């Protein structure tokens, strides 16, 4: 069974590295899809800037506030996902920045590939392992319960210092 798990891990490892080759940008496909949707909506919103680092974004009857240095939007999607929400995208377009540059690093290709940079090494099977003269490893000897009338866990966990039982 452990051999099956090891083989599955090796296969999955290779699949993940091949998957990274299919990315058409530096950002993961899932994050890119969300960002593209936010870009579509962000283009339709109205922005008010204090010409510093804070913005007000009008979306229908709602108004969201953005702080670029704290990387926060009052809708909280930016903080939760690490992907600029439609309000942040609107603000970034207003100041001429590229929203893709504000996606958190954990969606980037380099981070993804660094998670798979160590490989499982091939090993021979048990038939080919050398014999040893050491004694075989046996399971530990089972000791009888202290008080056969009491469940073993109560014997261990609920003993008072004098050795009498208390109710759990
Ligand atoms: Zn937002």
Image (cartoon, rainbow, N blue to C red):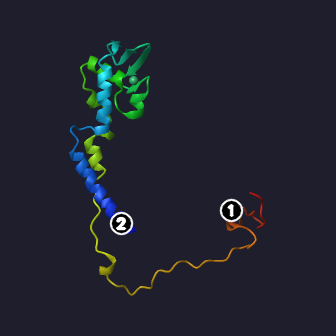
Is 78 drawn above or below residue 143 in the view shown?
above
Quarter of the rendering occupied by the N terminus = bottom left
> Residue, x 50% and y 80% (percent of image)?
138
Using residue 117 as the reference point, say whether residue 65 is left or right of it: right
Q: Position of residue 121 (x, y in %)?
A: 27, 65
Circle 2: element type = helix
Is 112 drawn above or below residue 122 in the view shown?
above
Circle 1: element type = helix
Q: Is residue 37 visible?
A: yes
| Residue lying farthest to the bottom in this orientation | 133
> Residue, x 74% and y 68% (percent of image)?
150
Q: Which residue lies under the disc numbered 2? A: 4
Q: Position of residue 147 (x, y in %)?
A: 74, 73
Using residue 33 as the reference point, say whether residue 144 is left or right of it: right
Instruction: Return the residue nearer the eye: 33 or 107.
Output: 33
Label tally? 2
- Residue neighbourhood size for the residue with mark 1, other residues' Cα within 10 Å, grouped as few (<14), some (14–19), many (≥20): few
Q: Quadrant of residue 167?
A: bottom right
Q: Which residue lies under the disc numbered 1? A: 157
N-terminal-most mark, 1 or 2 = 2
Separation (CA) of disc 1 from disc 2: 39 Å
Label 1 beta carbon less than 8 Å to ligand 1: no
Q: Nearer the viewer, mark 1 or mark 2?
A: 2
State if disc 2 and disc 1 touch (CB < 8 Å): no
Q: Quadrant of residue 145?
A: bottom right
Instruction: Return the residue nearer the eye: 100 or 158.
Output: 100
> Residue, x 76% and y 67% (percent of image)?
163
> Residue, x 31% and y 27% (percent of image)?
37
Q: Is residue 117 visible?
A: no
Instruction: Return the residue nearer the eye: 117 or 22.
Output: 22
Q: Position of residue 10 (x, y in %)?
A: 29, 60
């Amino acid at each position: 069974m452990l051999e099956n798990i090891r083989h599955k891990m090796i296969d999955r490892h290779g699949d993940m590295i091949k998957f990274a080759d299919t990315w058409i940008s530096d950002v993961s496909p899932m994050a890119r899809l969300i960002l593209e949707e936010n870009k579509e909506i962000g283009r339709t919103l109205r922005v008010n800037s204090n010409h510093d680092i804070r913005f007000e974004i009008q979306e229908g009857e709602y108004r969201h506030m953005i702080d670029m240095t704290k990387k926060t939007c009052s809708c909280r999607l930016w903080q939760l996902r690490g992907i600029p929400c439609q309000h942040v995208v609107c603000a970034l377009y207003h100041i001429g920045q590229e929203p893709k540059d504000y996606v958190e690093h954990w969606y980037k290709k380099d981070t993804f590939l660094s998670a798979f940079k160590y490989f499982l090494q091939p090993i021979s099977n048990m038939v080919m392992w050398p014999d040893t003269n050491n004694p075989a490893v046996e399971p530990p000897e089972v000791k009888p319960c202290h008080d056969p009338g009491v469940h073993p866990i109560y014997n261990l966990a609920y003993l008072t210092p004098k050795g009498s039982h208390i109710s759990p």
